[in-house]
Amino acid sequence: MKKALAGLLGLAGVAWALRDVPKQLGGKPDPARMARSPRYRDGKFHNDKVVSTVPDRDSFSLRDFIFGGEDRKPSAAVPLVGPAAPVTSGLHITWYGHASALIEIDGAAVLVDPVWSDRVSPSAHLGPRRLHPVPHQLSDLPALSAVVVSHDHYDHLDMETVQALVTGSSAVFVVPLGLGAHLRRWDVPEERIVELDWDESFSVDGFTLTCTAAQHFSGRSVQRNVTLWASWVIARGSRSVFYSGDTGYFPGYKTIGEAHGPFDAVLMQVGAYNDAWPDIHMTPEEGVQAFEDLGGGLLIPVHWATFNLALHSWTEPVDRVWREAKARGLKLAVPRPGERVDVDAPNEVDGWWQALS
Protein backbone atom coordinates (compact mmCIF):
# COMPACT_ATOMS: atom_id res chain seq x y z
CA MET A 1 0.00 0.00 0.00
CA LYS A 2 2.78 2.42 0.94
CA LYS A 3 4.62 1.68 -2.30
CA ALA A 4 1.47 2.25 -4.33
CA LEU A 5 0.82 5.53 -2.53
CA ALA A 6 4.40 6.65 -3.07
CA GLY A 7 4.06 5.78 -6.75
CA LEU A 8 0.88 7.82 -7.05
CA LEU A 9 2.50 10.75 -5.29
CA GLY A 10 5.47 10.47 -7.60
CA LEU A 11 3.26 10.51 -10.66
CA ALA A 12 1.36 13.46 -9.24
CA GLY A 13 4.64 15.29 -8.73
CA VAL A 14 5.70 14.66 -12.31
CA ALA A 15 2.29 15.80 -13.57
CA TRP A 16 2.58 18.98 -11.50
CA ALA A 17 6.07 19.70 -12.82
CA LEU A 18 4.89 19.22 -16.40
CA ARG A 19 1.57 21.03 -16.14
CA ASP A 20 2.80 24.06 -18.10
CA VAL A 21 4.30 22.03 -20.96
CA PRO A 22 1.42 22.05 -23.50
CA LYS A 23 1.37 25.83 -23.89
CA GLN A 24 5.18 26.01 -23.83
CA LEU A 25 5.29 23.80 -26.89
CA GLY A 26 3.78 26.66 -28.86
CA GLY A 27 1.56 26.56 -31.91
CA LYS A 28 1.54 24.68 -35.20
CA PRO A 29 2.61 26.71 -38.25
CA ASP A 30 0.34 26.75 -41.29
CA PRO A 31 2.12 24.72 -44.02
CA ALA A 32 0.49 26.84 -46.72
CA ARG A 33 2.10 29.96 -45.28
CA MET A 34 5.48 28.26 -44.95
CA ALA A 35 5.45 27.04 -48.55
CA ARG A 36 6.49 30.44 -49.89
CA SER A 37 10.02 29.65 -48.73
CA PRO A 38 12.36 27.76 -51.07
CA ARG A 39 13.76 26.10 -47.94
CA TYR A 40 10.41 24.48 -47.11
CA ARG A 41 9.86 21.01 -48.59
CA ASP A 42 7.88 17.99 -47.47
CA GLY A 43 6.45 19.86 -44.50
CA LYS A 44 9.83 20.94 -43.08
CA PHE A 45 12.55 23.56 -43.46
CA HIS A 46 15.98 22.48 -44.70
CA ASN A 47 19.53 23.75 -44.49
CA ASP A 48 21.41 24.43 -47.70
CA LYS A 49 23.22 21.13 -47.18
CA VAL A 50 22.34 17.93 -45.37
CA VAL A 51 23.43 18.20 -41.74
CA SER A 52 23.16 15.95 -38.72
CA THR A 53 21.06 17.36 -35.88
CA VAL A 54 21.16 14.24 -33.69
CA PRO A 55 24.21 13.73 -31.40
CA ASP A 56 26.55 10.96 -32.50
CA ARG A 57 26.28 8.24 -29.85
CA ASP A 58 29.94 7.26 -30.20
CA SER A 59 31.14 10.71 -29.07
CA PHE A 60 28.38 11.76 -26.66
CA SER A 61 27.29 10.35 -23.32
CA LEU A 62 23.90 11.40 -21.95
CA ARG A 63 25.07 10.31 -18.51
CA ASP A 64 28.08 12.64 -18.68
CA PHE A 65 25.83 15.44 -19.91
CA ILE A 66 23.46 15.07 -16.96
CA PHE A 67 25.98 14.24 -14.24
CA GLY A 68 29.08 15.99 -15.62
CA GLY A 69 31.99 17.49 -13.68
CA GLU A 70 32.13 20.61 -11.56
CA ASP A 71 34.21 22.46 -14.15
CA ARG A 72 31.02 22.96 -16.17
CA LYS A 73 29.84 25.50 -13.57
CA PRO A 74 31.48 28.69 -12.26
CA SER A 75 33.31 28.10 -8.98
CA ALA A 76 31.88 31.28 -7.41
CA ALA A 77 29.22 33.88 -8.11
CA VAL A 78 29.40 35.36 -11.61
CA PRO A 79 29.98 39.14 -11.42
CA LEU A 80 26.96 41.03 -12.72
CA VAL A 81 26.65 44.64 -13.85
CA GLY A 82 23.48 46.59 -13.16
CA PRO A 83 21.61 48.89 -15.55
CA ALA A 84 23.49 51.86 -16.98
CA ALA A 85 22.23 55.38 -17.63
CA PRO A 86 20.20 55.91 -20.82
CA VAL A 87 22.08 56.75 -24.03
CA THR A 88 20.87 58.80 -26.99
CA SER A 89 23.79 58.44 -29.41
CA GLY A 90 26.34 55.90 -30.55
CA LEU A 91 26.21 52.11 -30.77
CA HIS A 92 25.96 50.19 -27.52
CA ILE A 93 25.40 46.49 -26.83
CA THR A 94 24.37 45.01 -23.48
CA TRP A 95 24.83 41.28 -23.02
CA TYR A 96 22.57 39.69 -20.40
CA GLY A 97 24.11 36.22 -20.57
CA HIS A 98 23.78 33.32 -23.02
CA ALA A 99 22.32 34.77 -26.26
CA SER A 100 20.16 37.59 -24.86
CA ALA A 101 21.37 41.07 -25.78
CA LEU A 102 20.19 44.64 -26.25
CA ILE A 103 21.38 46.61 -29.28
CA GLU A 104 21.05 50.38 -28.97
CA ILE A 105 21.74 52.64 -31.94
CA ASP A 106 21.39 56.39 -31.35
CA GLY A 107 18.97 55.77 -28.51
CA ALA A 108 16.68 53.29 -30.30
CA ALA A 109 16.74 49.67 -29.12
CA VAL A 110 16.27 46.12 -30.35
CA LEU A 111 16.27 43.12 -28.01
CA VAL A 112 17.51 39.77 -29.35
CA ASP A 113 16.62 36.28 -28.08
CA PRO A 114 15.39 37.42 -24.66
CA VAL A 115 15.28 34.65 -22.05
CA TRP A 116 14.58 35.79 -18.50
CA SER A 117 13.25 32.48 -17.10
CA ASP A 118 15.18 30.39 -14.62
CA ARG A 119 15.21 27.29 -16.82
CA VAL A 120 15.42 26.65 -20.56
CA SER A 121 12.91 23.86 -20.76
CA PRO A 122 9.22 23.22 -21.45
CA SER A 123 8.84 22.90 -17.66
CA ALA A 124 9.60 25.57 -15.08
CA HIS A 125 10.67 22.79 -12.70
CA LEU A 126 12.90 20.58 -14.85
CA GLY A 127 15.76 21.18 -17.28
CA PRO A 128 18.93 23.30 -17.49
CA ARG A 129 18.93 26.04 -14.86
CA ARG A 130 20.67 29.40 -14.79
CA LEU A 131 24.25 29.53 -13.57
CA HIS A 132 23.85 33.21 -12.65
CA PRO A 133 20.87 35.48 -12.00
CA VAL A 134 19.43 37.72 -14.69
CA PRO A 135 21.49 40.93 -14.34
CA HIS A 136 18.63 43.32 -15.20
CA GLN A 137 14.88 43.16 -14.86
CA LEU A 138 12.70 43.54 -17.94
CA SER A 139 11.41 46.76 -16.38
CA ASP A 140 14.97 48.14 -16.63
CA LEU A 141 14.92 47.95 -20.43
CA PRO A 142 14.55 51.11 -22.50
CA ALA A 143 11.67 51.49 -24.94
CA LEU A 144 12.02 48.73 -27.53
CA SER A 145 11.46 49.10 -31.26
CA ALA A 146 11.56 45.34 -31.84
CA VAL A 147 12.21 41.95 -30.31
CA VAL A 148 14.17 39.71 -32.69
CA VAL A 149 14.31 35.93 -32.28
CA SER A 150 16.69 33.56 -34.07
CA HIS A 151 14.82 30.26 -33.63
CA ASP A 152 12.42 28.46 -31.33
CA HIS A 153 14.68 26.43 -29.02
CA TYR A 154 13.96 27.08 -25.35
CA ASP A 155 17.25 28.88 -24.70
CA HIS A 156 16.34 31.45 -27.38
CA LEU A 157 12.55 31.71 -27.30
CA ASP A 158 11.01 31.88 -23.84
CA MET A 159 7.24 31.97 -23.41
CA GLU A 160 7.17 33.81 -20.09
CA THR A 161 9.56 36.48 -21.30
CA VAL A 162 7.55 36.97 -24.48
CA GLN A 163 4.34 37.34 -22.52
CA ALA A 164 5.94 39.88 -20.19
CA LEU A 165 7.23 41.89 -23.15
CA VAL A 166 3.79 41.94 -24.76
CA THR A 167 2.32 43.75 -21.76
CA GLY A 168 5.44 45.70 -20.82
CA SER A 169 6.39 47.13 -24.22
CA SER A 170 4.95 48.04 -27.61
CA ALA A 171 7.71 46.28 -29.53
CA VAL A 172 7.01 44.30 -32.69
CA PHE A 173 8.25 40.69 -32.69
CA VAL A 174 10.35 39.98 -35.78
CA VAL A 175 10.97 36.27 -36.22
CA PRO A 176 11.78 33.58 -38.81
CA LEU A 177 8.95 31.86 -40.65
CA GLY A 178 6.75 29.67 -38.47
CA LEU A 179 7.55 31.23 -35.10
CA GLY A 180 4.46 33.38 -35.39
CA ALA A 181 2.41 30.27 -34.54
CA HIS A 182 4.10 30.13 -31.12
CA LEU A 183 3.57 33.83 -30.52
CA ARG A 184 -0.13 33.62 -31.42
CA ARG A 185 -0.50 30.67 -29.02
CA TRP A 186 0.97 32.93 -26.33
CA ASP A 187 -1.46 35.78 -27.09
CA VAL A 188 0.87 38.12 -28.95
CA PRO A 189 -1.39 40.38 -31.09
CA GLU A 190 -1.28 39.59 -34.81
CA GLU A 191 -0.31 43.17 -35.68
CA ARG A 192 2.84 42.81 -33.58
CA ILE A 193 4.12 39.69 -35.37
CA VAL A 194 6.39 39.84 -38.44
CA GLU A 195 7.64 36.56 -39.96
CA LEU A 196 10.50 36.59 -42.45
CA ASP A 197 12.34 34.15 -44.68
CA TRP A 198 16.08 34.41 -45.26
CA ASP A 199 17.04 37.56 -47.19
CA GLU A 200 13.80 39.34 -46.29
CA SER A 201 13.79 42.59 -44.30
CA PHE A 202 11.45 44.61 -42.11
CA SER A 203 11.83 48.27 -41.13
CA VAL A 204 10.72 49.87 -37.88
CA ASP A 205 11.80 53.09 -36.10
CA GLY A 206 14.69 53.57 -38.51
CA PHE A 207 15.95 50.00 -38.07
CA THR A 208 16.25 47.58 -40.98
CA LEU A 209 16.04 44.03 -39.64
CA THR A 210 17.21 41.44 -42.15
CA CYS A 211 16.74 37.71 -41.71
CA THR A 212 19.86 35.90 -42.92
CA ALA A 213 21.08 32.33 -43.23
CA ALA A 214 22.22 29.99 -40.47
CA GLN A 215 22.97 26.26 -40.31
CA HIS A 216 20.92 24.81 -37.49
CA PHE A 217 17.51 23.24 -36.78
CA SER A 218 14.37 24.00 -34.80
CA GLY A 219 11.76 22.41 -32.59
CA ARG A 220 10.18 22.63 -29.14
CA SER A 221 9.18 18.94 -29.08
CA VAL A 222 10.10 15.75 -30.92
CA GLN A 223 8.80 17.35 -34.12
CA ARG A 224 11.65 19.22 -35.76
CA ASN A 225 12.16 21.85 -38.44
CA VAL A 226 8.56 22.97 -38.95
CA THR A 227 9.80 26.49 -38.14
CA LEU A 228 12.79 28.30 -39.64
CA TRP A 229 16.08 29.27 -37.92
CA ALA A 230 18.12 32.34 -38.83
CA SER A 231 20.85 34.84 -38.15
CA TRP A 232 20.09 38.57 -38.22
CA VAL A 233 21.44 41.87 -39.50
CA ILE A 234 20.32 44.79 -37.35
CA ALA A 235 21.06 48.12 -39.02
CA ARG A 236 20.12 51.74 -38.38
CA GLY A 237 21.58 54.66 -40.27
CA SER A 238 25.26 53.97 -40.90
CA ARG A 239 25.59 51.43 -38.04
CA SER A 240 25.05 47.69 -38.25
CA VAL A 241 25.32 44.60 -36.05
CA PHE A 242 25.28 40.92 -37.01
CA TYR A 243 23.85 38.27 -34.67
CA SER A 244 24.65 34.66 -35.55
CA GLY A 245 21.90 32.85 -33.67
CA ASP A 246 22.80 29.17 -33.28
CA THR A 247 24.71 27.72 -36.20
CA GLY A 248 27.41 25.48 -37.49
CA TYR A 249 30.17 27.00 -39.58
CA PHE A 250 29.21 27.31 -43.26
CA PRO A 251 30.41 29.26 -46.32
CA GLY A 252 27.48 31.68 -46.19
CA TYR A 253 29.20 34.14 -43.87
CA LYS A 254 31.22 35.64 -46.69
CA THR A 255 28.04 36.06 -48.72
CA ILE A 256 26.28 37.76 -45.80
CA GLY A 257 29.27 40.03 -45.25
CA GLU A 258 29.40 41.01 -48.91
CA ALA A 259 25.67 41.78 -48.97
CA HIS A 260 25.28 43.53 -45.61
CA GLY A 261 28.70 44.29 -44.14
CA PRO A 262 31.04 45.53 -42.98
CA PHE A 263 29.63 45.31 -39.46
CA ASP A 264 30.45 47.49 -36.50
CA ALA A 265 29.94 44.54 -34.15
CA VAL A 266 29.18 40.83 -34.31
CA LEU A 267 27.43 38.79 -31.62
CA MET A 268 28.78 35.33 -32.34
CA GLN A 269 27.77 31.95 -30.91
CA VAL A 270 30.85 30.29 -29.40
CA GLY A 271 29.54 27.86 -26.77
CA ALA A 272 27.67 24.56 -26.41
CA TYR A 273 29.76 22.78 -29.04
CA ASN A 274 30.75 19.13 -29.13
CA ASP A 275 32.21 16.64 -31.59
CA ALA A 276 28.83 14.87 -31.42
CA TRP A 277 27.04 17.79 -33.15
CA PRO A 278 29.64 19.56 -35.33
CA ASP A 279 27.15 20.73 -37.97
CA ILE A 280 24.87 22.80 -35.74
CA HIS A 281 27.09 24.66 -33.23
CA MET A 282 30.42 26.29 -34.00
CA THR A 283 33.57 25.81 -32.00
CA PRO A 284 35.17 29.03 -30.72
CA GLU A 285 37.74 28.93 -33.51
CA GLU A 286 35.03 28.51 -36.12
CA GLY A 287 33.20 31.45 -34.58
CA VAL A 288 36.30 33.61 -34.98
CA GLN A 289 36.68 32.46 -38.58
CA ALA A 290 33.03 33.30 -39.27
CA PHE A 291 33.64 36.74 -37.77
CA GLU A 292 36.51 37.31 -40.17
CA ASP A 293 34.42 36.03 -43.10
CA LEU A 294 31.72 38.56 -42.25
CA GLY A 295 34.07 41.51 -42.07
CA GLY A 296 33.15 42.16 -38.45
CA GLY A 297 34.49 45.11 -36.47
CA LEU A 298 34.18 44.14 -32.79
CA LEU A 299 33.63 40.51 -31.79
CA ILE A 300 31.37 39.87 -28.78
CA PRO A 301 31.12 36.14 -27.94
CA VAL A 302 27.68 34.90 -26.83
CA HIS A 303 25.98 31.58 -26.08
CA TRP A 304 28.14 30.79 -23.08
CA ALA A 305 28.25 31.41 -19.29
CA THR A 306 24.55 31.10 -18.40
CA PHE A 307 23.24 27.58 -19.10
CA ASN A 308 25.05 24.24 -19.00
CA LEU A 309 24.28 22.84 -22.47
CA ALA A 310 27.41 20.88 -23.41
CA LEU A 311 30.29 18.88 -21.92
CA HIS A 312 33.04 21.49 -22.16
CA SER A 313 34.13 23.47 -19.11
CA TRP A 314 32.45 26.74 -18.20
CA THR A 315 35.36 28.95 -19.26
CA GLU A 316 36.59 26.98 -22.27
CA PRO A 317 34.58 28.80 -24.98
CA VAL A 318 35.75 32.28 -24.06
CA ASP A 319 39.32 31.17 -23.27
CA ARG A 320 39.60 29.71 -26.77
CA VAL A 321 38.00 32.76 -28.40
CA TRP A 322 40.37 35.12 -26.57
CA ARG A 323 43.39 33.06 -27.60
CA GLU A 324 42.28 32.88 -31.24
CA ALA A 325 41.37 36.58 -31.44
CA LYS A 326 44.75 37.58 -30.02
CA ALA A 327 46.53 35.32 -32.49
CA ARG A 328 44.69 36.98 -35.39
CA GLY A 329 44.89 40.53 -34.04
CA LEU A 330 41.12 40.98 -33.84
CA LYS A 331 39.07 43.36 -31.71
CA LEU A 332 37.30 41.51 -28.91
CA ALA A 333 35.03 42.51 -26.04
CA VAL A 334 34.00 40.10 -23.27
CA PRO A 335 31.50 41.91 -21.06
CA ARG A 336 30.23 40.67 -17.73
CA PRO A 337 26.51 39.80 -17.80
CA GLY A 338 24.59 43.07 -17.75
CA GLU A 339 27.55 45.16 -18.86
CA ARG A 340 27.00 47.65 -21.68
CA VAL A 341 29.69 47.78 -24.37
CA ASP A 342 30.38 51.05 -26.18
CA VAL A 343 31.26 49.57 -29.57
CA ASP A 344 33.34 52.62 -30.51
CA ALA A 345 35.35 52.50 -27.26
CA PRO A 346 35.17 48.98 -25.77
CA ASN A 347 36.99 48.10 -22.57
CA GLU A 348 40.09 45.94 -22.80
CA VAL A 349 39.50 42.24 -22.18
CA ASP A 350 40.52 41.58 -18.56
CA GLY A 351 39.87 37.84 -18.17
CA TRP A 352 37.28 38.37 -15.44
CA TRP A 353 35.93 34.83 -15.85
CA GLN A 354 39.26 33.09 -15.19
CA ALA A 355 38.94 33.45 -11.43
CA LEU A 356 35.76 31.36 -11.65
CA SER A 357 37.25 28.37 -13.47
Image (cartoon, rainbow, N blue to C red):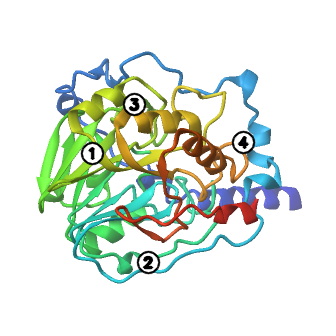
Residue identifier under label 2: 137
The mark nearer the N terminus, 3 or 1, is: 3
Q: Measure the C-alpha gap from mark 2 to mark 3.
A: 32 Å
The answer to whether any part of residue 202 appears in the image is yes
User: Horizontally, is 261 left or right of 71 in the view?
Assistant: left
Residue identifier under label 1: 233
Quadrant including the N terminus: bottom right
Secondary structure of the residue carrying numbered label 2: loop
Please say if the residues under marks 3 and 4 sit with CB atoms less than 8 Å apart: no
Q: Amino acid at mark 2?
A: Gln
Residue at 78 percent across and 55 percent down: it is 7
The mark nearer the N terminus, 2 or 4, is: 2
Q: Measure the C-alpha gap from mark 3 to mark 4.
A: 25 Å
Q: Amino acid at mark 4?
A: Leu
Residue identifier under label 4: 311
The mark nearer the N terminus, 4 or 1, is: 1
